[in-house]
Image: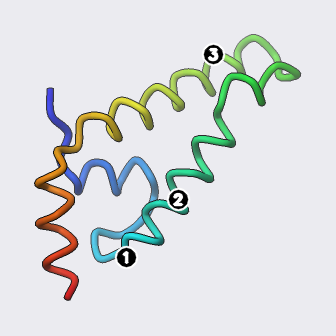
Amino acid sequence: MMASLSQFCVVLGVSEQASEKEIKLAYRKLAMRYHPDRTVNLSEQERQEAEAKFKEIQVNSDSVAKSDVEKYLENLT
C-alpha cells in the first residue's frame, strides 16, 4: 500500500507545507528516537511501542513514491 506524502507528513508531525529540510530533520529525529538500538533500556511495553512507531516511520518513508516527493517540492517553489 502506497502512503501519500501528506500521510508521511502526519506521521512525522510536520505540516504539508514543510520544506524538504524540515521533513528530513523530522524523519531523522524520530528514526533516532525510536530506533531499536536506542530503546534497549526501556520496559518491554515501551520497547514494543517504540518498535511499532519505528516501523510506521520506515513503512511510510519507504512507500512514499519519489514522484510524490518531486511534485511536493515543485509546489513549494
**Residue at screen point 26% across, 49% down:** 7
Q: Which residue is mark 3?
A: 48
Viewer-proximal residue among 31 and 44: 31
- Answer whether labels 2 and 3 touch (C-beta < 8 Å): no
**Residue at screen point 22% across, 72% down:** 73
Q: Residue furthest right?
A: 41
Q: Residues within 10 Å of mark 2 (few under 14, many from 20)?
A: some
Viewer-proximal residue among 76 and 56: 76
> Which numbered circle lies on residue 74?
none
User: Residue type at mark 2?
Assistant: Ala
Q: Which residue is mark 2?
A: 26
Mark 2 and mark 1: Cα distance apart in space: 11 Å
x and y percent of residue 17 in the render?
29, 77
Q: Residue furthest bottom?
A: 77
Figure check: 14 above or below 74: above
> Which numbered circle lies on residue 19?
1
Task: Give the secondary structure at mark 2.
Answer: helix
Task: Give the secondary structure at mark 1.
Answer: loop
Q: Residues within 10 Å of mark 3 (few under 14, many from 20)?
A: some
Q: Quadrant of residue 32?
A: top right
**Mark positioned earlier in the residue sequence (1 or 3):** 1
Please count the marks in the image: 3
x and y percent of residue 4 in the render?
17, 47
User: Residue type at mark 1?
Assistant: Ser
Figure check: 57 above or below 25: above
Left or right placement of residue 59 versus residue 69 in this view: right
Mark 2 and mark 3: Cα distance apart in space: 21 Å
How did the renderer colour the structure? rainbow
Q: Residues within 10 Å of mark 1 (few under 14, many from 20)?
A: some
